[in-house]
Amino acid sequence: MELTEQGSNSGGGGDAPVVDETPIFPPLSSTYSNVDDNHYVKMEDGDANDQIEKSNSHNSQPLSIANSVMTAEGLADPIGFLIICCVVLIGDMNRGVVFPIMWPLVQELGGDAVWLGYAVGAFSFGRIIASPTLGKWSIEFGYSKTLVGSTTTMLIACLMFAQVYRVNSLYYLLFTQIMLGVGSATLGVTRAFVAEITATRQRTVYIALLTAVQYGGFTVTPLFGALLMYALQDNRYEVGFIVIDQYSAAAYFMALLSAATLAVLMTKFQNRNRTKPTKRKASSRTSERDELADRTMFCGITVYDAALLGCMLLNVSTKGSIGSFETLGISFAQSHFNLEPETAGMIVSANGMIGVIALLSMGQLGKYFTDIQMIVGGMTVCAVGIISFSALQSVEDGADNATWKYFLGIFMIYGVGYPIGHTAVIGLFSKIVGRRAQGTLQGWFASAGSLARILFPIMSGYIAQFDDITTVFKVLFGILALSNFFVAVSSPTLTALST
């Protein structure tokens, strides 16, 4: 097999390297262009030019074909994808590992359910103020610099969180939660990276893989927090100025993981900068979709803008629902099932593992169901799991609720409903955005989810404090039912814009 050069005979394009008369994609500069229906966007490999110059200076063959060829069925940057998965994992582990200890920690600091809502919401507040900026920076400065800066912030925030119990201040807890949120506000950046290195028809599959990592981060890793809390309960160890106890061990554990991820980013991650896509003649299907997207609705906004807004609202309803359980899941397990925080954390982790398996099966589900169907089905299962808790009485009222009821409800929410429904929402949003620059839009999408994780936990905390926790479940059920109604009514338009 010989590597030859074939000039362009038509279309006015430049020379492209070919193998056995078949054009290589992407070219040697690793610049990914729009490829008709696959909707690749043009990205530049920050190190490609240097590598080509070195190759030419030594009169050697061009870059390895294995490193240059990308088909519509694969990833443009598999190593980069794995590193991105690590960034997403530690970002949501900062939420998951502390899940079992947050309620006991708030109680130790003198707080109640309302303070717990603020503490959980503070993490998302940090994300919401940082996500749009990081998304914009990923376009202006590239992914590498953006992710290195955010991961450094996360490392510092983990070390700060380790001192919360020593400082003994609820306000300091809120501040450290905000800083952790800022450091992990990279969901928009990471999703944009994945969107830009995958074909449109396979985007939901790879977004699902990324979401599986994220989901495992905040649903499976409570197991680590529960184990650390169990092992260090009533024990305290001092190593110089470092104090390790049941409240600080998780933070130091996350600091080590953040430092390791930062090292990988700085040494192995290949920087990529987005450039303006090459304009190509649109196909008839693309023209019809663009015509639909540009239509103005009765409210004065385009169909495209309305679809993006609708997806963001779906993100709010699904993220908000899971945020409420993140806030009240442990206290509900104690008050209605008499479960210890460690046990409740392990139940959530077990169902989180099931949810990860469901996410890894999204490729198979996608062969039989559309994104719209998976959204409706996932939110329906989640809503049923939530409403199943509303009829339960508390232990104080003499109820003896079986643990399997808690497990079943959590299974429907964490194991099936949320992971499938929410991931389909992410995939739908990315497909609707299409070839446009995704960094900023994904940043706003992530901010919408973070906003939900601010408002819903605080709302849930107030309702639980001044009314009853079962009222929270009824409110969440109503929100998800309304969201499903929106999806059903808008299904034809959303399908047309995403294909």
Image (cartoon, rainbow, N blue to C red):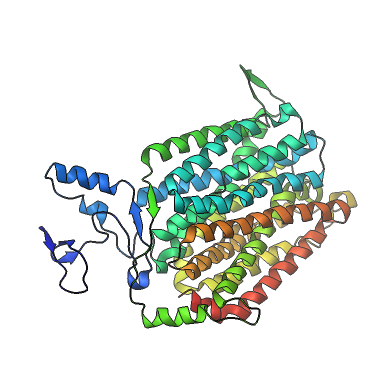
**Image quadrant occupied by the C terminus:** bottom left
Q: Which is more toward the observer, 377 or 238?
A: 238
Left or right of 395 in this view: 410? left
Q: Position of residue 52 (x, y in %)?
A: 22, 47
Kindly indicate the quadrant of the structure image that contains residue 487.
Answer: bottom right
Q: Position of residue 372 (x, y in %)?
A: 55, 73
Residue sitting at 64 percent across and 54 percent down? 450
Above/below status of 439 relative to 115:
below
Kindly indicate the quadrant of the structure image that contains residue 346.
Answer: top right
Residue sitting at 60 percent across and 73 percent down? 306
Left or right of 226 in this view: 337? right
Residue sitting at 23 percent across and 53 percent down? 66
Q: How many marks?
A: 0
Q: Is residue 222 visible?
A: no
Q: Position of residue 498 (x, y in %)?
A: 48, 73
Left or right of 290 in this view: 107? right
**Image quadrant occupied by the N terminus:** bottom left
Q: Which is more toward the observer, 408 or 2?
A: 2
